[in-house]
Amino acid sequence: MQKLVPLLLVLSVQCVYSVSLQEDLLDLELNVPKEKISQLFVQYIIQDVQFRHSIRYVRSDEFSDTWNQFLELAKVHQLLLYMQNAGLPIDKVLHMFAGFTGIQPPSTKFKRSLIKRGGLNAFIEDVVQVVAQSDVKTMTEEKKRLSSQFLEMTEKLNSDEYKRLFTEAFDDPDVIILQQELQTYDIELPKLLELMKAFFGWSAFF
């Protein structure tokens, strides 16, 4: 019984840590301007032939095979595991990405002149910009000030260790081969990660 009490205390602290951090991340996710991103997606679908070409490929079995190869590479797995251990729900995000089937058209009107053409990469840059102009950045700074767990997570994701793992993952010869295959479709693997980060509000802190 004496040994059980310290164990329960450790488990309870871990549970509080996890719940508190996930609540902070959910707050960020809920404040990402999804409606604006949805509008942006429809604009690109309507106006950008190169973007439509990329999206068709992303939904193909060929891309699915390439993406799974990418995730199974040792250095990529190590990078994602580091992100997961830092506190990000990587499994959840990857499962959502795997289930990607498209976005419903927005209910609001938009001007055709709002976007520039440039394929999937240009779309991702615009999404990141939309998130940067939202309240997510301010909310992130507030959560870093109020939550030691959140601050610790952001420090890990901005550390030299994370940067090393990221560089090693994308400098891996096998990743470079996969990237070359995707280049034909205007798809860059680091950019896809940037899109995931933006969609969940993570781009505000790393």
Image (spheres, rainbow, N blue to C red):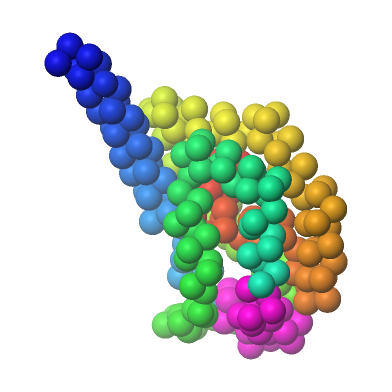
Q: Can residue 106 be seen at all in this image of the molecule?
A: yes
Q: Is residue 112 above or below residue 68?
A: below
Q: Position of residue 171 (x, y in %)?
A: 82, 48
Magenta-tinted stretch: 40-64
The image quarter containing residue 127 is bottom right
Q: Nearer the viewer, residue 72 or 63?
A: 72
Q: Position of residue 38 (x, y in %)?
A: 51, 74
Residue closest to the far top: 2
Q: Is residue 158 above or below residue 68?
A: above
Q: Is residue 171 above or below residue 87?
A: below
Q: Residue visible at 84% across and 62% down?
A: 177
Residue closest to the far left: 1
Residue 163 relative to residue 135: left or right: right
Q: Position of residue 114 (x, y in %)?
A: 65, 75
Magenta-drawn stretch, dominant element (helix, strand or loop): helix
Residue 97 relative to residue 31: left or right: right
